[in-house]
């Protein structure tokens, strides 16, 4: 399988692009998730940013949505996804996994 793009492995998985869509593979090259995303980043603490329908959200290693796909970017994920730095429009701010804005 030839990939169109890839990120380094993080937490045993790497985001890779195949046929125009992003997904994840394990260190043996086995598909660990479907290639269903418009974009994907590396895992941090068991969570990764992924992009669907033009917006970024957060998924876990089981590829369940943790933070809804509604942001222009996910900058980083910390504290078991209870502190996520996001961008919406020109504003950067922190949210918890339910999307509640955190006061920093």
Image (cartoon, rainbow, N blue to C red):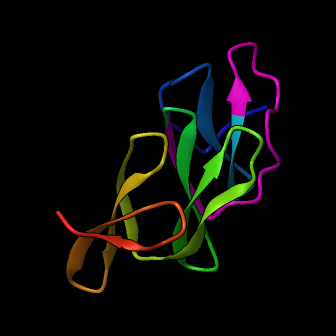
Is 59 placed above or below 72 here?
above
The one nearer the camera, 57 or 101, is: 101
Residue 3, position as x, y percentages in the image: 66, 38
Residue 65, position as x, y percentages in the image: 69, 60
Residue 31, position as x, y percentages in the image: 82, 32
The secondary structure making up most of the magenta span is: loop
- Residues rendered magenta in the picture: 25-43
Is 39 placed above or below 32 here?
below
- Which residue is depicted at the point 59% across and 30% down? 14
- Which residue is depicted at the point 72% across and 30% down? 25
Is 61 placed above or below 53 here?
above
Q: Is residue 14 left or right of residue 30?
A: left
Q: Is residue 102 left or right of residue 12?
A: left
The one nearer the camera, 5 or 75, is: 75
Residue 64, position as x, y percentages in the image: 75, 53
- Which residue is depicted at the point 44% across and 61% down? 96
Is 21 placed above or below 10 here?
below
């Amino acid at each position: 399988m030839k990939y169109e793009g890839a990120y380094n492995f993080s937490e045993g998985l790497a985001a890779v692009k195949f046929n125009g869509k992003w997904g994840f593979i394990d260190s043996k090259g086995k598909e660990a998730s479907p290639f269903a995303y418009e974009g994907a980043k590396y895992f941090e603490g068991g969570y990764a940013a992924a992009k669907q329908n033009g917006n970024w959200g957060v998924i876990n290693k089981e590829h369940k949505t943790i933070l809804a796909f509604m942001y222009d970017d996910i900058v980083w994920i910390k504290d078991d996804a209870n502190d996520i730095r996001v961008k919406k429009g020109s504003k950067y701010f922190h949210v918890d996994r339910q999307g509640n804005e955190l006061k920093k």
